[in-house]
Amino acid sequence: MEYGSDEYRAFLTERREALLESIQGAAARSGRDASQITLLAVSKTVGNEAVLSAYRAGYRVFGENRPQELKKKVAYVRQVKEMEDVRFDMIGNLQKNKINQVLGNAHLVQSVSSVHLAEAISRRAVAQGKSVRCLLEVNVSGELSKSGVPVSQARLAMDALMGMEGIEPMGLMTMAPANDASAARATFSGLRDLRDDLKEITGLELGVLSCGMSGDYQIAVEEGSTLVRLGRIVFDPAYKSV
Ligand SMILES: *Cc1c(COP(=O)(O)O)cnc(C)c1O
């Protein structure tokens, strides 16, 4: 199937409808309103043509995990007139020397995984007279392979972010262990509980809880996710289960 083909566009549209329905079902199971949940399409494995097809299928929010690719895709959509209302979020590991590629291009930097990184973003934001919406990435599961601040340091980190010029903390982000539904559920509910604590302590709204990927987004929605980051299940016709 070619990315620009009518057939691929039809697949994207149908898949999106199935995903929205499934998100709605998961939200209803926990008494939530699905209109509060953002479906972000992770476009890291596809090119501009597929992004345009996804846009035409109804997607408006995209995520990239590499600064250079984010910058390239944003440059592309800025010259396509119909795509004015698109947003790209930075969701992957961000090195300090790549921050400038993200400033002014990312709507939300979801992967602020340390206070050091936040400081570096703050310095560059101030220098450019910008303000950057951020999520604090938290390693809720404690897996060594995962980035993010440990839960035990999240309060200190959020206090630090709050005091930084040019940083707007909007919420929390996490990734769950793969292929383990009960560990995923514990991770997502842990993120929600942490957000509730931090919200009370800081007085910040922290309205964004970014969690849930192709394999675990329904659990994430049941546990309070307000933003699911879906890649394969959005773009790959071979990824079957919705
Ligand atoms: C790739 C990626 C996703 C999407 O993963 P899928 O399993 O393809 O849905 C979500 N979040 C981050 C941070 C990613 O890098």
Image (cartoon, grey):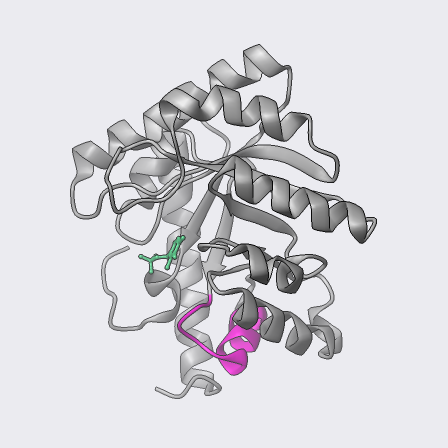
Residue 25 seen anywhere in this rendered image of the structure: yes
Residue sitting at the far top:
201
Residue 60 seen anywhere in this rendered image of the structure: no
- Say whether residue 216 is left or right of residue 92: left
Front-most of residues 56 and 104: 104
Please tell me how many numbered marks the rendered image carries.
0
Which quarter of the image is occupied by the N terminus?
A: bottom left
Q: Residue at x 59, y 73 (%)?
A: 73
Task: Give ligand 1's quarter of the image.
Answer: bottom left
Magenta segment includes 91: no
Front-most of residues 132 and 211: 132
User: What percent of the width, then of the height, locates residue 22?
Assistant: 36, 46
Front-most of residues 116 and 166: 116
Q: Residue at x 61, y 30 (%)?
A: 161
User: What percent of the width, then of the height, locates residue 197?
Assistant: 48, 14
User: What percent of the width, then of the height, locates residue 133?
Assistant: 66, 42
User: What percent of the width, then of the height, locates residue 217?
Assistant: 34, 44
Q: Quadrant of residue 165?
A: top right
Q: Which secondary structure is most common in the magenta stretch? A: helix
- Say whether residue 62 is left or right of residue 219: right
Which quarter of the image is occupied by the C terminus?
A: bottom left
Magenta part of the protein: which range? 43-56
Reply above or below: 19 against 43: above
Q: Residue at x 23, y 39 (%)?
A: 143
Reply above or below: 135 against 7: above
Q: Quadrant of residue 75?
A: bottom right
- Say whether residue 216 is left or right of residue 59: left
Reply above or below: 187 against 68: above
Q: Residue at x 38, y 61 (%)?
A: 231
